[in-house]
Image (cartoon, rainbow, N blue to C red):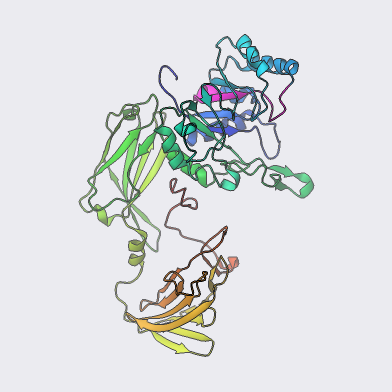
Amino acid sequence: YVNNVKVKFKGVNRHVHWPTSGRAVNRNISLNDALLIKEMNMNAVRMSHYSPDKHFLEICDSLGLYVLDELTGWQYPPYDTSIGREKVKELITRDANHPCVVIWDNGNEGGFNFELLPSYARYDIQKRAVIHPWLEEKDVNTYHYISYGVGTHFYFGGNKVFFPTEFLHGLYDGGHGAGLDDYWNLMYNNPLSAGGFLWDFADQGVVRDDKNGFMDTDGDHGADGILGPYREKEGSFYTIKEVWSPVYLEGTKFLPPSFDGKIKVQNRYHFTNLNQCSFSAEWVKFDYPSGKVSVTKAKLEVPDIAPGYVDYLKIETPADFTHYDALYLKAIDPYGKEIYTWTRTITTAGEYAQKLIPATANNTTKQEETVSEITFRAGNTKLVIDKAKGIINQIEVGGKTLPLTNGPCFTTGNLEISETKYFEENNAHIAEFWLRPQNTSGQKSTRNYIRISLLPSEWIALEYAFDVAGLYNHIGVTFDFPDSNVKSVKWLGNGPYRVWKNRMKGV
């Protein structure tokens, strides 16, 4: 509790680290790190696994970040008692006067000497709480890396205050934002939860002068950050920023035609009323192929919403809002910093794709066939397909050959073609390849096929589906396209980073 208000930690573990200087950092690096933590809508940081530079604590004092300050160490074995008492004295006498420090950590993951506990009470006149990260204790549980469905009598199903001092490990960006939305909502709605601390803040890579400047993360030992070694923002950065936003929008990312201008919002601040924040709304149209964005600003009513309460944001909505492609909604905190900018889609991806294809097309599609290839023509477009492999050999438009070839190829390996069809449908010529299923039933699967079509509009349509057996890093299809031929890319879609099934927020 802070000023009699229950607080949940939205925290991260931070090492003191910089690629060109190792464990030595300056005040500017500390300030930048703290500002990035705040930018992700976090409110807490754990000092893993040692106390930080003084200037980092001074910055946390000024920005209002809660700090778990940790006795230097790693895991078992802990300090001997005589040495440990000196280390505790040094830690507390140096850091005790920082109001950001709310908890002392007596070691990490088994590196605990419980005979040191009286020293904390002796030197800290405020008698702050002392915990043992990774341990289930009498009144609190900080166990690490608990699964979402952990079971009864523990964590979500237990009877102790819990906050994992490490959770959702971010090795190669595989945790952090991935799974955080479900995990955090379970935490947020559990009265015994005091939040938690993600592992960890930034990749710990060292520039190796003896290896021509190679960024060495010691294999998979240091590549577990939300940010890159130089604090490059990765996918989870944006997901965390949305999931931990104190302005929490409910509902889906899509606005239906029945949208009445109201969006349900919950105030997840601890102390701030949402009427202290400012909001802006914009109705947006995307133009193809220019890439131009047309914006119509909308008025927005911000209700009086106290911390923990729910109400509606009321957005000025034009009668023809379905003619727009998206709604942008931005929230700004009382200090002028962006909390988050949400996008609510109006036009679906399929609907937008239809806008790109001419409504009418008078081109007649034609078909030619040789022993090894099938060729479709429409207007100035020529499409050549390999009959045996079911892949595109050549695309020619206006007499110029496009370098997109050798696909679609499955990233899970080639599947054997069991049946081939070439036919005309709705004035389009279609090549359809049925694939042998990866099961022993011998029956044709409705999910194992490739369909390549040349439409009268001269657009090429690709449709595919396939069953997957086994484990793969990537599932999908690929083509050959020389990098040297790419001058620029225009992108309209979810971003700025890739999306996973368990990391849908932050785009």
Question: Residue 266, how many percent across, how many down?
Answer: 33, 34
Q: Quadrant of residue 473?
A: bottom right
What is the number of callouts on the image? 0
**Residue at the image position 43 percent from the left and 42 percent from the top:** 182
Q: Quadrant of residue 157?
A: top left
Does 289 sit above or below residue 225?
Answer: below
Does 461 sit above or below residue 252?
Answer: below
Would residue 72 be seen by someone viewing this image from the given angle? yes
Q: Quadrant of residue 1?
A: top left
Looking at the image, residue 145 sits to the left or right of residue 327; the answer is right
**Viewer-side residue, 305 vs 501:** 501
Would residue 42 be seen by someone viewing this image from the given angle? no
Question: Residue 185, how many percent across, how many down?
Answer: 41, 37
Residue sitting at the far right: 210
Looking at the image, residue 414 sits to the left or right of residue 249; the answer is right
**Viewer-side residue, 467 vs 49:** 467
Looking at the image, residue 296 sits to the left or right of residue 194; the answer is left
Does 327 sit above or below residue 385?
Answer: above
Question: Residue 472, how many percent across, how many down?
Answer: 57, 59
**Residue at the image position 47 percent from the left and 48 percent from the top:** 503
**Viewer-side residue, 473 vs 191:** 191
**Residue at the image position 32 percent from the left and 26 percent from the top:** 306
Question: Residue 285, how many percent across, how many down?
Answer: 33, 55
Which range of residues does the magenta coloring cover? 59-79
| 57 drawn magenta | no
